[in-house]
Image (cartoon, rainbow, N blue to C red):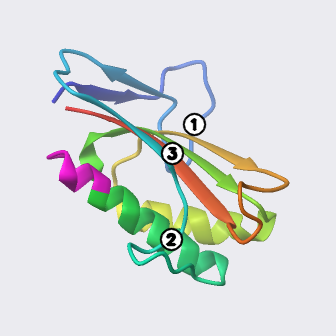
Amino acid sequence: MPIQLSNPAGVHAPGAYSHAALVTEARTRLVISGQVGLTPEGELAEDGSGQIDQVLANLAAILAAHGMDRSNLVKLTAFLTDAALVGPWRGARTEWLGGHAPASTLLIVAGLADPRFLVEVEAEAAA
C-alpha cells in the first residue's frame, strides 16, 4: 500500500484521524470535489444527519468508480454550517471509515454554495 498514516512524536495525539498521510509509489491519485447531500436523483435530505449519510454514500460511489475504497483515502476536508453537526459528523465518519484514519480537517463555515446545503466534504485518495 502506498499510503502511510502517521502521528509523529512532538505533536498532540489526534482523535479519529492521522496528522499526516505519506503517499509513496502511488500510481493513481484521485482528487474528489466537495460532495454535498444530493442523491443521484437530485434530492436533498432536510437534516444534517441525512446529508452526512448521503455525502458518505457519494464519496463511496466515487471511490468505487475509480477502483478504490475508503482505505485509499489520504485526506478528508469537511465543511459544516452548524457546530451542532460536529458530533454527528465525527460519529458517521468514524463508523464509515471502519478504523482507517486519514488526515482530516473540519471547518465550521457561515454557508455553502446553496443555503440548503449543511455539509460538504472533499477528499483525496491514492492507490
* Closer mark to the observer between disc 2 and disc 1: 2
Q: Residue at x 20, y 24 (%)?
A: 2
Q: Residue at x 52, y 30 (%)?
A: 19
Mark 1 crowd level (few <14, some 14–19, many ≥20, 10 Å Cα): few
Q: Is residue 22 placed above or below 15 in the rendered structure?
A: above
Residue 22 vs residue 53, the one in the foreground: 53
Q: Residue at x 55, y 62 (%)?
A: 36
Looking at this view, name the residue that lies furthest to the bottom: 46
**Disc assigned to residue 13:** 1
Earlier residue among tags 2 and 1: 1
Which contiguous range is marked in magenta? 62-69
Mark 2 crowd level (few <14, some 14–19, many ≥20, 10 Å Cα): some
Q: CA distance from mark 3 to mark 1?
A: 24 Å
- SS at badge 3: strand
Q: Look at the image and tell me whether residue 98 can be seen.
A: no
Earlier residue among tags 3 and 1: 1
Q: CA distance from mark 3 to mark 2?
A: 14 Å
* Closer mark to the observer between disc 3 and disc 1: 3
Q: In the figure, is residue 116 to the left or right of 26?
A: right
Q: In the figure, is residue 60 to the left or right of 124?
A: left
**Residues at marks 3 and 2 touching, judged by CB atoms closer than 8 Å:** no
x and y percentages locating residue 77 in the rendered image: 56, 43
Amino acid beneath label 3: Glu
Amino acid beneath label 1: Ala
Residue 3 vs residue 68, the one in the foreground: 68
Q: In the figure, is residue 73 to the left or right of 90?
A: left
**Residues at marks 3 and 1 touching, judged by CB atoms closer than 8 Å:** no
